[in-house]
Image: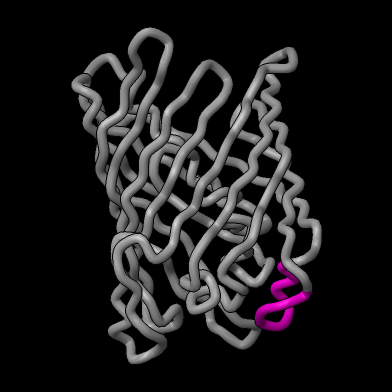
Amino acid sequence: MNSRILSLVTAGLLLSAGSVQADEWSANFGASNNYIWRGLTQTTNEPAISGGIDFAADSGFYAGTWASNVSFAADDVYSYEHDLYAGFAGEADGISYDIGYLYYNYDEEAGFDFSEVYGSIGFGAFTVGLNVLADTEADEGIGQDFGFGEATYLYADYTTEVGDGVELGFHIGSHKGDFSEAFNGVPGDYIDYNISLSKNGFSFMITSTDLDDVGPDNLDNDDVKFVVSYGMDFEL
């Protein structure tokens, strides 16, 4: 989901196209005890396995695809999320940037396919970004369509090395709009936040939201969640 580690814990594949020195193909693999996207579980608090393929050009252009299992209710069989994205990322005078388009594709269990446009800017260890809903396709006969700009996600991240290759990360995000209620069964406006430690592909995250105990059963959107994950990438 755009230029972040689509670690099953954030939403959310940190594409590093801006730092690539030559055209290259790469692949990634991840596993987690929970797939958290913008503070909300996408697997009813069950494990997730993901993987993807990326292309990054020395011009800063990148494109890729990513997939994971998902489940949105206790009695759902596991279904899938399949993302397609493309964008342009780079760095100039110590300021990094990333803009792009992201399409989320699901089977009929989710009831929606949808897409976003996104942009972010980084200053050293700080990154701020905005994702804007582009459109929805409620063509499975569930729910309603939403138009451009009817939902937004504004976030801020801070990541720093705290010694021996260990990275400490902080995240806060704010979702606005009714789409989250149609898609994830929670009120439209909420805040999510997390703190994480990562090293050599392993990550531990503590995450929660400001939501009350609302939404479908057993999603526990108001609880603090502990997420352990492992991810790796390799050149093709």
The residue located at (36%, 27%) in the rendering is 97
- Whether 189 is drawn above or below 38: the answer is below
State the extent of the magenta-drawn residues as a range: 213-221
Relative horizontal placement of residue 161, taking residue 65 as reference (left or right): right
Question: Which residue is found at the position 56% from the left and 25% from the top?
Answer: 126
Q: In the picture provided, is 78 more to the left or to the right than 46?
A: left
Q: Which residue is drawn at 57% across and 60% down?
A: 48
Q: Position of residue 80 (x, y in %)?
A: 43, 69
In the picture as drawn, the residue positioned furthest to the bottom comes out as 141
Any part of residue 12 in sight: no
Picture layout, residue 51 above or below residue 202 = below
> Can residue 175 be seen by looking at this rendering?
yes
Question: Per the image, is 132 magenta?
Answer: no
Q: Quadrant of residue 111?
A: bottom left
Q: How is the image coloured?
A: one colour
The image quadrant that residue 62 belongs to is top left
Percent from the top left, x then y, of residue 196?
A: 71, 37
Q: Where does the image place residue 190, in percent across and percent down from the top left?
A: 63, 61
Residue at screen point 46% across, 71% down? 179
Q: In which quarter of the image is the C terminus?
A: top left
Residue 130: where, in percent of width, then height? 44, 44
Q: Which of 206 and 148 is in front in this view?
A: 148
Magenta span: predominant SS is loop
Q: Is 218 covered by the magenta stretch?
A: yes
Count of marks, rendered view: 0
Left-right relation of 203 to 59:
right
The image shows residue 179, relative to residue 52, as above or below, that is below
